[in-house]
Amino acid sequence: MIGVGREWVKFDEIGTSSERPPMDTNPFRWKPMKTNSPPIRVLVVDDSAFIRNTLSTMLMKFPDVQVVGTAKNGMEAIEQVKRSQPDVMTLDVDMPGMNGLAVLDYVMAHCPLPVIMISALTNEGAGVTLQALERGAVDFIPKDVGQKHFDIDWIEGQLHDKVREAYQAQLGVHQARHTGVNNISSVSVSHPQKKGETRAAIRRPDISWEGVNRAATQQTHDMFPLVVIGSSTGGPNLLKQLVRDLPVPFPASLIIIQHMPKFFTKVFSENLNAVAPFPIREARNGDRLEPGVGLVAPGDQHLFIDRQANGRAAIKISTESVHLPYRPSVDCAMASAAEHFGSSVIGVVVSGMGNDGVVGCQKIKEHGGTVLVQNEATALLYGMPRAVVEAGWADAVVSDVQLVECMVQAVEAILEERALAIPVGLRPSKVRNGSG
């Protein structure tokens, strides 16, 4: 197996706009090297000797990984980081004395590196882990403390993938985001507003929707657009930023598919609801889709859209196996959305490894919908966005701070199109006849 190593490279210019400002901060990223290179150096930190040994043994099975040390508490972890200079660290959340969050804060402030949190699969563990992501951790692996036996096979598969993903992560972009530094785009975003407060006018990116194919417009009982966002590693912090900056009223329904296990999505949806200007909650079976309401797919289950007897769109939650590597699946939700909402669907794919979302975006485009993708310069991991772009399904590839404005613009384009199809006397007054 060819090892994945680290090399520093300048960012390539992303996008086609001649107005894109040069990147003068965080100008480097990590990427997989194409030739043989040294293995990924990993430090394992956990207060349990059993878990330290288990994780170390798992990692040593892979030729592209080298375990350079272990630590049983926070102080040892900091000393090992200084001495061993690892590329990636796995860090237990719950340790006596200096806990995982304290270690993370120190590392991110003094010697930043990609950190994967090892956390309990509980509501409490989910809350602390999401705090860790906000404070700089790249990803996490849950461990089910309720089981008598450590699920070695499941953890082993997750561990190697996440170590590789963390190693390839754009740490510079991640540091800028979690410390509040975000000057990679000239597009201005309004300040957060309280629930029910109307947002002032904003400057939008110069994106034209004239080329978006809506020839396959499908009439539905639901006369509002539907936005479906697909996200994985690097997504939680970005999604918090996105929903915070959405306008009120938001005339579209919002569905979020974030790769997370059970327990975590409930806490995650509560965190989003705390900053969003409209209600967001974890989706339940039978929930009706409504404009100005956000639903988060529950962990370890697939989310589909179904029709009730009265023709209204509703959520269907299923644990059925559809032979996909992720549950919840972005592909499942987007394909289902396209089937029921046709050209009124806006698919958004942001940071994550792999290609979940490619099939869903294809279905959206086949039904005349719109696809937005986060660009490489601002995505922690460009795997999922890259897959959509390379497949040819993206209508616009934009920065994180431009995503909100593009979403709003796309929603307004759909609503205006629908209004122009209504007889003149019945149109809303704010839509002018013949305006585009």
Image (tube, rainbow, N blue to C red):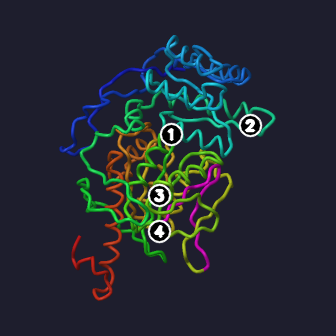
User: What x and y, as percent, mark residue 49?
Assistant: 72, 20
Residue highlighted by disc 1: 233
How far apart are the alpha carbons under marks 4 and 1? 28 Å
Foreground tag (3 vs 4): 3
Which quadrant does the C terminus fall into? bottom left
> Can see residue 343?
no
- Describe residue 228's horizontal placement relative to residue 428 as left or right: right
User: What x and y, as percent, mark residue 136?
Assistant: 47, 33
Q: Image point 50% across, 61% down: which residue?
A: 294
Q: Image point 60% across, 75% down: which residue?
A: 308
Residue highlighted by disc 2: 145
How far apart are the alpha carbons under marks 2 and 3? 33 Å
Q: Earlier in the sequence, mark 2 or mark 4?
A: 2
How far apart are the alpha carbons under marks 1 and 3? 17 Å
How far apart are the alpha carbons under marks 1 and 2? 23 Å
Foreground tag (2 vs 3): 2
Foreground tag (1 vs 2): 2
Which span is picked out in magenta? 293-309
Q: Earlier in the sequence, mark 2 or mark 3?
A: 2
Residue 228 is labelled as 3
Q: Amino acid under label 2?
A: Val
